[in-house]
């Protein structure tokens, strides 16, 4: 049952990710940086395994999917978030962004969503960041489409875009949630309760 729900979650979120991908993808890799300025899939998987623990199979599939569609990221964010929805929803999170040059900074995100979406979940999040040179690039709103199928546990990925910067959050969560929504996340230097 647990494997079936995990497969359902990955299928639903990857399928809905294609809608977000249409807005986020140009052709092949969107990264405009040299490979020594970006992270390889092995580096991201190593960090993901350290951060997420034993969700290795689903994580590898999600990372492979994002790399096939977007290429190598220029940064990544690891953090935690909580969200809930009854048609309209809210999401709040915080984490640390890491760049290949060694720069890192604490970052917060929050945002509203609307759609056929019910329930709540808490997630650990690994977000792959494309075409960003510093956290200052990210302090804005990033639109995206998301599908969720969490029942006790699950894993999901979606794409968000603002100009040439693409964000690909990979989430593993606990809770009870099912649905699909559209919305945005606003990334900021400081925490705030205002999702708008």
Image: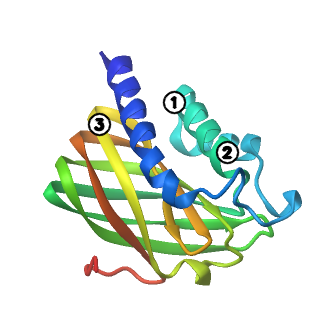
Q: Secondary structure at mark 1?
A: helix
Can the viewer see residue 84?
yes
How many marks overall? 3
Give percent across and percent down for residue 66.
Answer: 60, 45
Q: Residue at x 26, y 57 (%)?
A: 83
Q: Secondary structure at mark 2?
A: helix
* Colouring scheme applied when the structure was drawn: rainbow
In space, the residues marked 2 and 3 are separated at their CA atoms by 22 Å
Residue 41, placed above or below residue 100 = above
On screen, residue 166 versus residue 148, left or right, reads right
On screen, residue 87 versus residue 148, left or right, reads left
Camera-side residue: 61 or 182? Answer: 182
Q: Which residue is mark 1?
A: 58
Q: Which residue is mark 2?
A: 67
Q: Residue at x 52, y 41 (%)?
A: 52
In space, the residues marked 2 and 1 are separated at their CA atoms by 14 Å
Q: Going by the picture, which residue comes out furthest to the top?
A: 1
Q: Which mark is residue 149?
A: 3
Q: Quadrant of residue 38?
A: bottom right
Q: Which mark is residue 37?
A: none
On screen, residue 128 versus residue 171, left or right, reads right
Q: Earlier in the sequence, mark 2 or mark 1?
A: 1
Q: Earlier in the sequence, mark 1 or mark 3?
A: 1
| Of labels 2 and 1, the one closer to you | 2
> For mark 2, does the 10 Å Cα neighbourhood hold few (<14), some (14 to 19), or many (20 or more) residues?
some
Give percent across and percent down for residue 116.
Answer: 18, 49
Q: Secondary structure at mark 3?
A: strand
In space, the residues marked 1 and 3 are separated at their CA atoms by 14 Å
> Quarter holding the N terminus?
top left
Q: Earlier in the sequence, mark 2 or mark 3?
A: 2
């Amino acid at each position: 049952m647990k494997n079936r729900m995990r497969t359902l979650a990955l299928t639903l979120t990857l399928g809905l990710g294609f809608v977000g991908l249409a807005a986020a993808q140009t052709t092949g890799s969107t990264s405009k940086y040299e490979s020594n300025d970006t992270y390889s899939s092995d580096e991201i998987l190593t960090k993901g395994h350290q951060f997420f623990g034993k969700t290795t199979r689903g994580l590898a599939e999600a990372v492979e999917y994002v790399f096939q569609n977007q290429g190598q990221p220029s940064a990544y964010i690891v953090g935690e978030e909580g969200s809930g929805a009854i048609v309209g929803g809210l999401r709040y999170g915080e984490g640390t962004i890491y760049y290949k040059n060694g720069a890192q900074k604490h970052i917060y995100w929050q945002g509203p969503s609307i759609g056929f979406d019910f329930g709540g979940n808490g997630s650990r999040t690994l977000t792959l960041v494309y075409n960003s040179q510093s956290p200052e690039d990210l302090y804005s709103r990033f639109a995206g489409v998301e599908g969720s199928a969490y029942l006790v546990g699950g894993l999901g990925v979606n794409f968000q875009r603002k100009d040439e910067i693409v964000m690909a959050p990979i989430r593993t969560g606990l809770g009870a949630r099912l649905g699909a929504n559209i919305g945005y996340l606003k990334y900021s230097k400081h925490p705030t309760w205002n999702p708008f």
